Amino acid sequence: MARRKIVAGNWKMNKTPSEAVALVEELKPLVASEDVDVVFCVPAIDIIPVAEAVKGTNIAVGAENMYFEEKGAYTGEISPAMLVDAGVKYVVLGHSERREYFAETNETVNKKVLKALEHGITPIMCCGESLEQREQGVTMDFIRQQVKVGLQNVTADQAKTMVIAYEPIWAIGTGKTATTEQAQEVCAGIRACIAEVYDDATAEAIRIQYGGSVNAATAPELFAQADIDGGLVGGAALKPDFGKIVNYK
Ligand code: PEP
């Protein structure tokens, strides 16, 4: 069965609650699509107003992070139950910015993935190499490790529902998109890794996005690749361009 494409915007630390609602109103008609799953991953404080603003549309709301404990003395953190209650369906986990600035590791990503799945939230689990790793020729070794540890104790049935985002760090926010060949090669490698860890059926079901300076011009060719099931989009998710990326065909 063909995998349904999924295009998710990662708003990062942009937009106050009122600005977020204004952006949703602007993008709503532009991202209407029957063929593609559309997700707005927004800052925690924007989740409730955005969930209200997208009611009755094809847009799902995602969070940009989540803690792996149920509740308690974790000042500043947000629990999976809080996200579910607020209407969140997806959560970005292990984004390279969280790994770099907030000490996220493969192990903490794994704990968060398991917790999100337990609560019925779909993880968008990010992986990707640095420029140095690419130049050293260790891209796939590094990503396989991220994927394998991130998926520890995740069942095949759970893995089938997940989204993995391949985001080469050197392409995030730099305007430098990986070439179509580079992106397809790594996404195929991730799928092969899933087949190894689980089985072919799981590898065929899991959705793998490409992320890294995706824009309206690059999306059509990227999303046409056999192993690329859509995109995780940063900068362009805050602009009308996002509508063109969703309706890339
Ligand atoms: C991202 O933050 O996930 C991302 C891909 O950003 P950008 O599209 O701006 O490179």
Image (spheres, grey):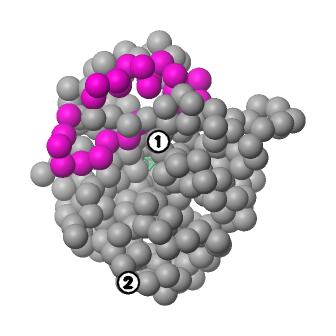
Which callout, 1 or 2, points at the residue further toward the start of the chain?
Answer: 1
User: Is 149 drawn above or below residue 230 in the view shown?
Assistant: below
Task: Give the labeled residue for mark 2.
Answer: 200
Q: Is residue 39 left or right of residue 248?
A: right
User: In this rendering, does residue 99 appear at all?
Assistant: no
Q: Residue at x 36, y 79 (%)?
A: 201
Task: Please identify the residue farthest to the right as the structure is shown.
Answer: 73
The one of 218 and 107 positioned closer to us in this rendering: 107
Q: Is residue 21 left or right of residue 4?
A: right
Residue 170: give x, y in percent of width and height.
Answer: 50, 60
- Residue drawn at x 24%, y 44% as measured from the top left: 246
| Crowd rating for badge 2 (residues with CA inside 10 Å; few <14, some 14–19, many 20+) | few
**Residue depicted at x 40% and y 50%:** 232
- Residue 237 placement: quadrant: top left
Question: Hey, which quadrant is residue 242 in on the image?
Answer: top left
Give how far across and how far down residue 107 sits, in percent.
72, 65
Circle on res. 102:
none
The range drawn in magenta is 32-57
Q: Amino acid at mark 2?
A: Asp
Left or right of 110 in this view: 17: left
Labelled disc at residue 89: 1
